[in-house]
Each structure stands twice: as C-alpha cells, then as structure tokens.
Amino acid sequence: MRAVFRTDKGKIRQRNEDNGGFFVNSTGDRLAIVADGMGGHNAGDVASKMTVDFFYNEWQKSSEINTAESAEKWFSDRVDIINQEILVHSRGNAACEGMGTTLVAAICTNDFATIVNIGDSRCYIFNENGFKQITEDHSLVNELVKTGIITKEDAEHHPRKNVVLKALGTEEKIEADIKTIIIEEGDYLLLCSDGLSDKMSELQMKEILENENSIEEKAQAFIDLANDNGGEDNITLILINVATDVESGCNE
C-alpha cells in the first residue's frame, strides 16, 4: 500500500492549522488522518495537533484490526475520548476558547477501509467504477442541498459555504459518521481538508488520478492546483493507492 501525505499553508493564511499523517503500527495496520483546525486566537492548530497526536499514540498501542466491526469500534471509542480532551483543554485555556477541528480518518487493510468523519473534511474513492465522495459533509450548505433549498451547484458558491455544523471539541457529545467500504488492488483513496476540495471540481480531481504520474506527483498536483485556484485556505491531503505487494508511506 502506497501513501503520500502533503500539507501546505496555501497562499493567504499566515499559519497552517491543518494536521495529519499516515501511520503504520507494529502489526502492519495503517491509519490515515486529516484534521482541519478552527477557532479563535489561532487555536485551530492546537486542536488539530491534539487530535492527530492522540490517534497516532493510540494507533501505536493497538493490536491487529482484521474486521470491519473492530475497526468501527476502534474509531467510535476514541472519538469520544479526544472530543472530551479538546473540550476540556479549550475550557481551561483562554487562548483556546472555542477551538475545534474537523476529522476524516481511515483504517486501511488490503480488503477494506473503515472511514470516520466529522465536519467537512472528506474522503473520496477512485476505482473502476469512477470517482466519488464517500463521506458526507456536516455543513450548513450540505443540509440546504439535502432539503432541496439550494442545488449542489449553488452550494459551491454559497456565501456560507464554510459553516460547519459539527467539529471535534465543540460540544459534550459528538456523533461521527463511520462506514466501511471494500477496497481492491489499484483503488485510490483521497482524504483531504476543504482547502483542497473547495478549490477544484470532482472532474479535475479525477483527471489528476487518471494520469500516469507517480503517486507523489499526483499528490503535488493537487496542492499546486488548489494554490493556482486561489489557495485561500490551508491545503492537506493523504493519497493512498491500494497495492498489496508494496508498503510505503510519507509524512512530510
């Protein structure tokens, strides 16, 4: 399994409040995670770093995960813990008041991927059936689309496009979306913050994945296009290629 992690502060922001990584534990299981921090006094980077550090440490202690049920439980148990940790930290530190973070993460085996998301960071899959979004945004505009008030096309340019309805660390109880999908040799998974998904169409994403470039070149092409299209936000992605005979990862 090949994986590349890239993050870039973009062309406008003074700092990068995104975080993430691709981690392999002692039993060879893989965890990919992207967290997009938010909050006053630039505390978003605190929330996203707390989240990634927590999941990394928990992953290093984890035993082999070989069923979808165990992967889903692993996520649900730990989402509750880190949600409380961020909430307590924000309430106990004035500079961090109101901070939170989105989360999209995937436990990847050679047969399936279990994906968790909170907020508007996304996971996509590209395979023989095409390119599609797996996760559902917890955002105001997505709710407006679901209820038929606006169209999906309207949502792309809506003035409140970045209003998130759920984030880790912002309320006592948080309910994450968790689902498991079958993955096969040659499939791609793309996990990203909205700094990437807001700056290009799904057709453009698909075109990058379809070309003959290496996985590293594809990942960089995503960053470059997001910046070429404005780069107003931090840009973070993990690109995973399912390949059973190769094991590599990059955390830059």
Image (spheres, rainbow, N blue to C red):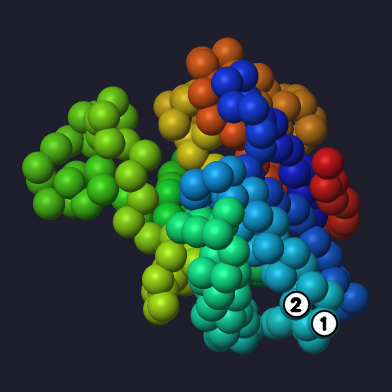
Farthest residue, direction left: 149
Distance of label 1 from label 2 (alpha carbons): 5 Å
Rendered location of residue 139, percent (x, y): 32, 50
Residue 58 tag number: 2
User: On the rendered structure, is 185 left or right of 192?
Assistant: right
Circle 1 SS class: helix
Marks 1 & 2, CB-CB < 8 Å contact: yes
Q: Nearer the viewer, residue 221 or 165?
A: 165
Q: In this view, does 204 lie above or below 167?
A: above
**Mark 1 crowd level (few <14, some 14–19, many ≥20, 10 Å Cα):** few
Rendered location of residue 94, percent (x, y): 55, 59
Q: Nearer the viewer, residue 158 or 150?
A: 158
Give the residue type at disc 2: Glu
Give the residue type at disc 1: Lys
At a point 80% along the width and 86% down the height, the residue shown is: 63
Q: Is residue 179 above or below residue 105?
A: below
Say whether residue 241 is visible.
Answer: no
Residue 95 tag number: none
Rendered location of residue 93, percent (x, y): 59, 64
Residue topped by disc 1: 61
**Mark 2 crowd level (few <14, some 14–19, many ≥20, 10 Å Cα):** few
Circle 2 SS class: helix
Rendered location of residue 76, percent (x, y): 53, 80
At a point 43% along the width and 27% down the height, the residue shown is: 201
Labels in figure, total: 2
